[in-house]
Amino acid sequence: MPTVNFIDWGQVDYQQAWDQQEQIFKTIVDHKLAERELPQEQKTVLANSVIFCQHPHVYTLGKSGKKENLLLDEAGLKRVEATFYPINRGGDITYHGPGQLVGYPILDLEQFFTDIHKYLRFLEEAIILTLAEYGIKGDRYEGYTGVWLDPDKPNARKICAMGVRCSRWVTMHGFAFNINTDLNYFKNIIPCGIDDKDVTSMERELGYKLDFEGVSQKLKANIAKQFEFQYS
């Protein structure tokens, strides 16, 4: 059974978190490359990580995104005290900020299964299970990644966005789960490039501010359940 270290970075600058992710990711990829010619029985595996954190206000744009989906110029970014980064994950533009749980699983999928679509569905299911513990019915929306409420209805709204990178079956980047998020910041972008759907949070749906740490612990357990790993 694979071993996974859960790491809580608290609130951390986006660039700092990205640099640290890249370092962990590179270490695993380089290790796999160095051992690729060895017989299977001689190969060793490095520990996997799932990192939880929050970021100061920031907008990030994936490789397939369009810069025009950011509706602010430099002056506008300064006005709302936000930063902007084009990054190397999949997906379009999204927002991160306080009250949003950002998860960065850095997993060697060869220790689990080699199927990136299955990986995304497992992450979605962990979010759906967590929402259910609070009486919120999360769901998938055909044609879209992430977790939604009331998909296929006029009031469809996204509560968790996802965008990942995978190389040599090692993952990085991950998901952004709106718990107590200030949703006004989404008005400054076309979230994920989708201009006709709403964004929501657990706080908005339930009408009260959630215990952030409590939600985090439930999600941690649900991720471990989905991927069937031991964690520390």
Image (cartoon, rainbow, N blue to C red):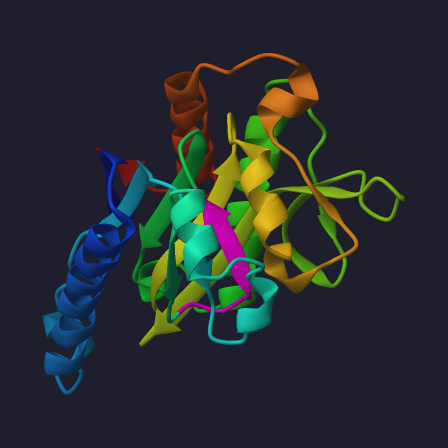
- On the image, the x and y values in percent for residue 52 come to 32, 38
- In this rendering, would 93 be left or right of 46? right
Q: Considering depth in this image, is 4 or 113 the residue closer to the camera?
A: 4
- Residue 81 can be seen, yes or no: yes
Q: Is residue 36 above or below residue 85?
A: below
Could you tell me if residue 228 is visible in this image? no
Of 198 and 134, nearer the camera is 198
Q: Which residues are magenta?
A: 89-96
Determine which quarter of the picture holds residue 92.
bottom right
Residue 92 horizontal side relative to residue 35, left or right:
right
State the residue in front, 207 or 226.
207
Residue plotted at (69% across, 24% down) = 136
Toward the right, the furthest residue is 154
Q: Quadrant of the C terminus?
A: top left
127 displayed left or right of 54? right
Q: Is residue 93 magenta?
A: yes
Q: Position of residue 127 (x, y in %)?
A: 55, 37
Q: Quadrant of residue 192?
A: bottom right
Residue that appears at 53% across and 61% down: 93
Q: Is residue 207 magenta?
A: no
The answer to whether residue 201 is left or right of residue 34 is: right
